[in-house]
Amino acid sequence: MASESMPSRSSHLESRQLGNSPLGRLSLGKMCCWLLVLAGLIPWASQSFAVSPSRSLETALLLNSPGQVEIEGDEAGRLSFASTLFSVNEASGSATITFRREGSTVGAVMVGFTTAAGGSASPGDDYQPTLTTVSWGNGDGADKTATVSIFDDATAEPTETVDLVLSSPTNGAVLGTPSEATLEILDDESGGPGNCTENPTTLCLQGDRFRITADWIRPNGQNGVGMGVELTDDTGYFWFFNAANVEMVLKVLRGCSNNGNYWVFAGGLTNVQVDIRVEDTLTGEVQNYRNPLRTAFQPIQDTEAFPTCP
């Protein structure tokens, strides 16, 4: 008769009702404990207990009044920012910060969101310090948003930054990547296009009106920011791991005479997760695009990206 190897004990975070565990997959020790439960020697109707790598299921059953086994992990999902970088024009009045729940959507969860000290912007003068929670219901995997109030002034000044932090996820959720981000406050005293300042991780297209960044995540969890290279006034590319290895090409086209919109087109040569952020620095309007992890890059052909002509 062919033999079947027994499954190893997992230390991943899961939360399972004991009644859902198939007896045929239990080890001898676990089977003994189940017999005690079924015999009524160990009550389990209403209590819960924890199992960790240093505490076996058998031990937990014998030393506790069992009801629900909780094994450390992320059974309620991973909670993170949608990007490592958000930008806002100081005249906009508020910045919208986007959050994601990935993986499992079992259960209602929350995560703390706060503006933290450390950025170059001054709390109370440039922005309103924010401390709040972001919530998802059971089965809810939709992106969520929160706002940070921004204060305008009449002083010409460089771009200022606010540190953003997530903390204390609840009900079995864990912090995903990224759990820290930066909010850039762009000065509006120049009064027109050209607010985008190009740097190694930023493309500035269409006369420096449109600001483009790209974040990436590998299957092993490694993450980083794409390095941008401008080719023409409307086109550029990003590399992630090696300057000689182009990962994505993107362009912003002026389609005003066709449908009154600026268009965003992009194509990639990768299957890592890519989060693209395109901002019209004149209006503060933002479009976000994502290529999922382990998915061949899907072409972007958004001919209604920015109805902000001229």
Image (cartoon, rainbow, N blue to C red):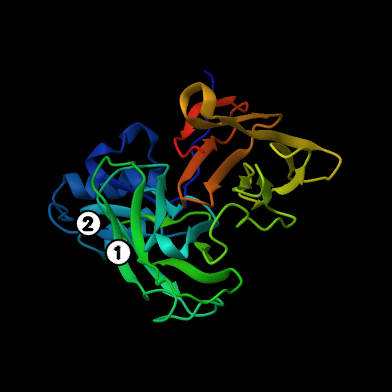
Asked whether residue 300 appears in the rendered view, the answer is: yes
| Residue furthest out toward the top | 1
Report x, y in % for residue 106. Answer: 29, 43
Task: Please identify the residue farthest to the right as the structure is shown.
Answer: 244
**Residue 156: quarter of image:** bottom right
- The three-letter code of the residue at mark 1 reads Thr
Q: Which residue is mark 1?
A: 133
Mark sitting earlier along the chain (1/2): 2
Q: Is residue 14 left or right of residue 84?
A: left
Q: Compare residues 249 and 23 and report the one nearer the observer.
A: 249
The residue shown at (37%, 76%) is: 129
Q: Secondary structure at mark 2?
A: loop
Q: How many marks?
A: 2
Residue 174 placement (x, y as % from top left): 42, 57
Q: Nearer the viewer, residue 292 or 195?
A: 195
Mark 1: few, some, or many residues within 10 Å (few <14, many ≥20)?
some
Q: Is residue 299 above or below residue 180?
A: above
Give the CA separation, mark 1 to mark 2. Answer: 32 Å
Q: Is residue 169 visible?
A: no
